[in-house]
Every structure is written in C-alpha cells, then in structure tokens.
C-alpha cells in the first residue's frame, strides 16, 4: 500500500493476498462525485467505479450492489434484469451506513457488513486497473478488475444508460 491509512476494505484485500495499491485525494464535502476524484487525481473517469447500493422492490435489508463508471448513470431496468429481479431502486441514503457500514462518498464493494450480490458494469474488464473507494472518503483502491471481482464474487453486465 502506498500509505499508512488502512480501512476494512484494504485489510481484507491484504489478508487475502490480493494485490492493490491506494491513492489518497483531498475530500471536498460539497462535491463527493467521482468526477471530482478523477479531476483531482488526473485519472480517466471511465476507470473510476462508483459503488451504488440498491434494493429489490419489497425486500428490506437485502441489498444489491452495482459498480459503474463514475461518469455513467445506472439503468434500473438493466440492473433488475442483471440481478434477475422484477424491479429495484437505490436504497435511501439514510440507510446506507446501517446496511453497508459505509457512508456516501466512501462506499466500497469490499468489506460491507454482509456479502451482497455484486455486479460490475461490463466495461470494468476493459482496463488493466480500475479505481474503487477504499471504504472512506479521500482514498481509492487501485486494483486489477478481475482480481477485485473474484474477491467480491461479482459478475459483469451492461448496467448503464
């Protein structure tokens, strides 16, 4: 790791022997977007993946996790199809910490409170490295996409508009 800061996500990857590095950036509370992170770190936004947490309609506490390029927008119909559910929607922001252990702007696909079904947008495999939240604002994990997807037992699908 490139820094001394450790998060639950980085500890889990380290313990499993999954190679990764981290990058730190200045947090701007007024702009928690991945586009801001891309600009700060001078990275291509299509390689920075945001982690979004959804719920199947009518099912409380059972989350569905999507990781999509930061500049893209989730297509809920495609997401529902990919998870094999009728309908889903983003969870209310107030429930994020209780369900995942993470806060907005620091939600990682690694190390949530429970192991939820996870799907990455199919573009993730086009890159040697992708960037995802390290589980806190101000830090990104730099990792090979297949290594990350294998670790979180994710599949890929077309998830964006």
Image (cartoon, grey):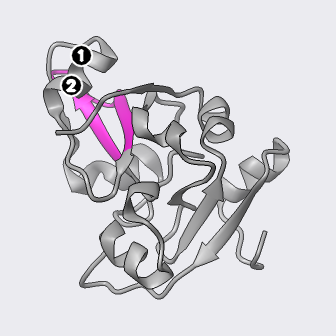
Which residue occupies 34% across, 63% down? 104
Q: Is residue 50 magenta?
A: no
The residue beneath circle 2 is 78
Label 1, label 2: how far apart the Cα atoms are? 5 Å
Which residue occupies 23% across, 38% down? 160
Position of the N terminus, as image quadrant, is bottom right
Graded by Cα atoms within 10 Å as few (under 14), some (14 to 19) or many (20 or more), the crowding at tag 2 reads some
Asked if marks 1 and 2 touch (Cβ < 8 Å), the reply is yes
Position of the C terminus, as image quadrant, is top left
Residue 116 or residue 158, whichever sits in front: 158
| Horizontal and vertical percent position of residue 150 | 65, 30
115 lies above or below 134: above
Which residue occupies 41% across, 75% down? 37
Which residues lie in the magenta part? 52-67
The residue beneath circle 1 is 81
| Horizontal and vertical percent position of residue 106 | 44, 64
- Predominant secondary structure in magenta? strand
């Amino acid at each position: 790791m490139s820094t001394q800061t450790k998060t639950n996500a980085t500890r889990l990857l380290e313990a499993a022997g999954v190679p990764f590095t981290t990058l730190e950036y200045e947090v701007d509370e007024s702009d928690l977007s991945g586009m801001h992170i891309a600009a700060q770190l001078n990275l291509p936004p299509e390689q920075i993946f945001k982690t979004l947490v959804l719920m199947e309609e009518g099912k409380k506490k059972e989350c569905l996790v999507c990781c999509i390029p930061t500049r893209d927008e989730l297509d809920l119909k495609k997401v529902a199809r990919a998870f094999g559910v009728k309908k889903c929607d983003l969870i209310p922001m107030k429930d994020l910490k209780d369900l995942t252990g993470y806060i907005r702007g620091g939600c990682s696909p690694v190390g949530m409170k429970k192991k939820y079904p996870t799907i990455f947008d199919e573009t993730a495999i086009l890159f040697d490295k992708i960037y995802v939240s390290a589980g806190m604002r101000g830090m990104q994990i730099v990792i090979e996409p297949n290594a990350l997807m294998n670790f979180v037992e994710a599949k890929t699908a077309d998830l964006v508009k």
